[in-house]
Image (spheres, grey):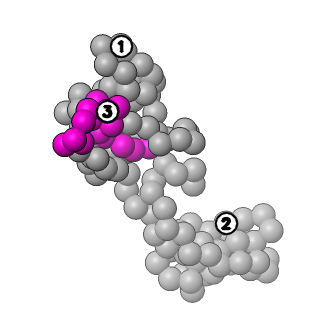
């Protein structure tokens, strides 16, 4: 049974996140009552809804069904420095990022120093 705030693998192999449970309508049954779990699937541009058993359509196996809970992606935070042909590793301070870049590209001017904050697997 999927839970809010957890990550899952879909039947098609994509990563999904359940962001909310809208519950049931106490006044009348509607589609939301059948699919109260709301969330997102990696690579899809629309919000998805699932039944309490993780299906997008009752009784039928679909690619967007939630089939297995997976660990949450690790956060990536830090500074990177950019030159014309090199990028420093992620560093805890701006100065360390610049020093790493200068060790990689001796004499190359630093074009930018950028703060990165993302989750592992977000295209970095």
Q: Is 32 left or right of 122, judged from the image as shown?
A: left
On the rendered image, what quadrant is the C terminus found in? bottom right
Q: In the rendered structure, find residue 60 and report the number of the disc placed on it.
A: 1
Residue drawn 28% across the image and 47% down it: 22
The mark nearer the N terminus, 1 or 3, is 3
Q: What range is drawn magenta here?
A: 25-40
Is residue 91 at least partly visible in the picture? yes
Asked if the magenta segment contains residue 95, the reply would be no
Q: Residues within 10 Å of mark 3 (few under 14, many from 20)?
A: few
Viewer-closest of 97 and 112: 112
The mark nearer the N terminus, 2 or 1, is 1
In this view, 112 is above or below 40 = below
In this view, 21 is above or below 54 = below
Instruction: Check disc 3 and report its element: helix, strand or loop.
Output: loop
Viewer-closest of 39 and 107: 39
* Quadrant of the image occupied by residue 49: top left
Residue drawn 49% across the image and 48% down it: 121
Q: Residues within 10 Å of mark 1 (few under 14, many from 20)?
A: few
Q: CA distance from mark 3 to mark 2?
A: 52 Å
Q: CA distance from mark 1 to mark 3?
A: 19 Å
Q: Is 102 left or right of 43, judged from the image as shown?
A: right
Labels 1 and 3 touching (C-beta < 8 A): no
Q: In the rendered structure, find residue 87 and report the number of the disc placed on it.
A: 2
The mark lying in front, picked from 1 and 3, is 3
Q: In the rendered structure, find residue 30 and report the number of the disc placed on it.
A: 3
């Amino acid at each position: 049974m999927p839970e809010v705030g957890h990550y899952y693998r879909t039947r098609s192999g994509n990563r999904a996140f359940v962001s909310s449970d809208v519950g049931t309508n106490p006044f009348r049954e509607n589609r939301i009552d059948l699919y109260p779990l709301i969330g997102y699937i990696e690579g899809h541009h629309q919000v998805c809804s699932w039944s309490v058993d993780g299906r997008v359509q009752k009784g039928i196996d679909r690619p967007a069904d939630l089939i297995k809970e997976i660990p949450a992606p690790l956060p990536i935070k830090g500074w990177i420095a950019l030159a014309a042909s090199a990028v420093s590793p992620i560093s805890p301070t701006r100065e360390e990022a610049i020093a790493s870049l200068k060790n990689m590209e001796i004499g190359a001017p630093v074009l930018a120093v950028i703060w990165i904050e993302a989750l592992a697997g977000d295209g970095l």
